[in-house]
Image: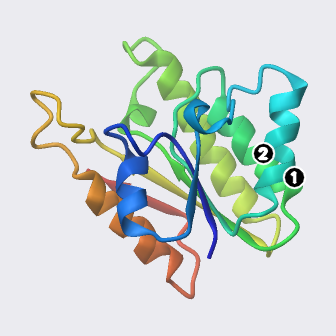
Amino acid sequence: MKILCTGNPNKPTLAKSIKKTFENVDFASTSTGWDLRMWDQNSENYFRNNIKKYDVLINSSFICNGGQMKILNITFDEHINPIHVINIGSTTEYLGRKSSYGIISIDKRALKERSMQLNLQNETFKSTHLTLGGLNDGQPGHENWLNMDHIAETIDWILRRPFNVPLIGIE
């Protein structure tokens, strides 16, 4: 199983826990030469050409202006072989537009809805959306938040199931 995970494993992110949990993982971040904002055609083409090499995409980095959604849609459009996309959502999905997380809330909710929709369209494309509470990134006040290693273990569990797991909420 060859995995692409968005994010930098050298920072206190989910990517760091993914690196500890899985063996065959590449990471897509600016530090590894991937521009996931895809503001130009070259960076979008780079993603389009390279996503075809993977069996799993862990779509974990929030990218403003619907970046995670674009990654999901391109992956769906470009997949040739079976692929499983794990989309990382947030409990901000439950908040309204007027919250201090308004844009993130809208983007994450739309990502969840699109993930669920794509699950029904193609037998070779699986998509799981994880709605997560706060993640313990080592910052003061985050000590009781979710342990990112547990999230990586949950992703491992999902990928090993013989059935599809379209949605999980973890707090």
Picture residue at 34% right of the left edge, 58% below the top: 151
Q: Quadrant of residue 106?
A: top right
Q: Tell me: residue 101, above or below residue 46.
A: above
**Residue 23 - label:** none
Specify the quadrant that holds the N terminus.
Answer: bottom right
Picture residue at 64% right of the left edge, 56% below the top: 116
**Residue 77 - label:** 1
Residue 26 coordinates in the image, percent (x, y): 59, 56
Element under label 2?
A: helix
Distance of mark 1 from mark 2, alpha carbons? 6 Å
Q: Tell me: residue 72, above or below residue 56.
A: above
Picture residue at 61% right of the left edge, 41% below the top: 111
User: What's the amino acid at mark 2?
Assistant: Asn
Asked if the residue under mark 2 is in contact with the one under mark 1, i.e. CB atoms within 8 Å, the reply is yes
Element under label 1?
A: helix
Q: Tell me: residue 47, above or below residue 1.
A: above
Instruction: Mark 1: give few (<14), some (14-19) or many (20+) Cα within 10 Å.
Output: few
> Considering depth in this image, is 77 or 42 the residue closer to the camera?
42
Q: Quadrant of residue 96?
A: top left
Residue 27 coordinates in the image, percent (x, y): 57, 49
- Residue under pointer 2: 73
